[in-house]
Image (cartoon, rainbow, N blue to C red):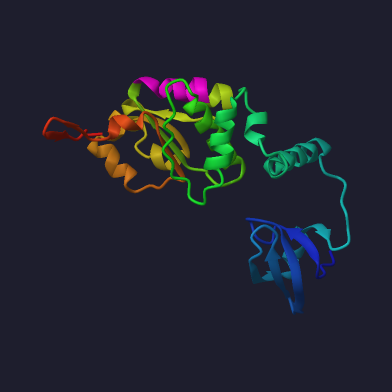
Amino acid sequence: MQLATGQIIKNLVPSEPVRINKISRLGNMTSIHYSGINTNITNNKMVPNEMLPALEIISEDGMFDFSGDPEKFKLFAEAERINSAFQFDPLFAVNCSLIDPLPHQVEAVYKYLLPLPNIRFLLADDTGAGKTIMTGLLIKELMMRDLAERILIITPGGLTKQWQEDELMLKFNLPFKLVNRAIFNADPNIFTSNNKLVTSIDFIRAEDVLNVLSEVGWDLVVVDEAHKLSAFDYGQKRYRSKR
């Protein structure tokens, strides 16, 4: 096998294919200076000449290979189209979800929420105005734009299943995992090993859970029924919730 600069080969390093930048014959060894195709990291490796046949040439500059799986190429092209669709569709999350939003819901998400450089927002519409719909639209837009990956949704205990199944999965096709005491006891690392979680405020305020949460970070945290977390005054006394 004749190796040359510009060729893309595999089996030189286990993690990725590489492009040959320079090759030098040094007796019974060959020095290969290369760049990783995925990481673009450059390095140099000495390879015994008898090991050269194990290197497989995938491609080289100016050469096109049409031997790939056409179905996989079609799936890749479709995935790339969907991944960049938000740049051309101003209401992308609306058009790929099973919802029929009202004008004020679209306005809240696309006029007020998404344009913010740092989304920190109190959504305080009346009961039945569709705050959950607005939240689902926001989450889906942020995910499709690669602006949010780790998302935690905190709700009252009786609403966790509704958020997970009826709202996020059914309407927006967003798979979130539900975390409660039993699941946490079985897997204490669940807050670090999963990126999209739904849990209840009365569960996560437990001391052992807060100790775990203090070590992890989130791109987006949604608190449902947030008014139930605040302090309130009654007469001359202020009451503070453990939430």
Q: How many marks?
A: 0
Q: Quadrant of residue 54?
A: bottom right
Q: As drawn, is 52 to the left or to the right of 202?
A: right
Give the quadrant of residue 22: bottom right
Furthest toward the bottom, the residue is 26
Name above or below for residue 187 compared with residue 4: above
- The picture places residue 71, in percent across and down from the top left corner, at 80, 35
Query: Is residue 79 rendered magenta in the image?
Result: no
Measured as percent of width and height from the top left, residue 188 is found at 34, 37
Does residue 173 appear anywhere in the picture? no
Magenta-drawn segment: 158-167
The residue at the point 51 percent across, 20 percent down is 166
Q: Percent position (x, y) of residue 112?
A: 53, 41
- State the predominant SS element of the stretch in magenta: helix
156 vs 217, nearest the viewer:
156
- Dividing the picture into quadrants, the one containing residue 230 is top left
Q: Quadrant of the N terminus?
A: bottom right
Magenta-drawn stretch contains 163: yes
Instruction: Locate the C terminus and report the quarter of the image it occupies.
Output: top left
Left or right: 218 as drawn, with respect to 231: right
Residue 59 or residue 210, whichever sits in front: 210
Asked if residue 146 can be seen in this view, the reply is yes
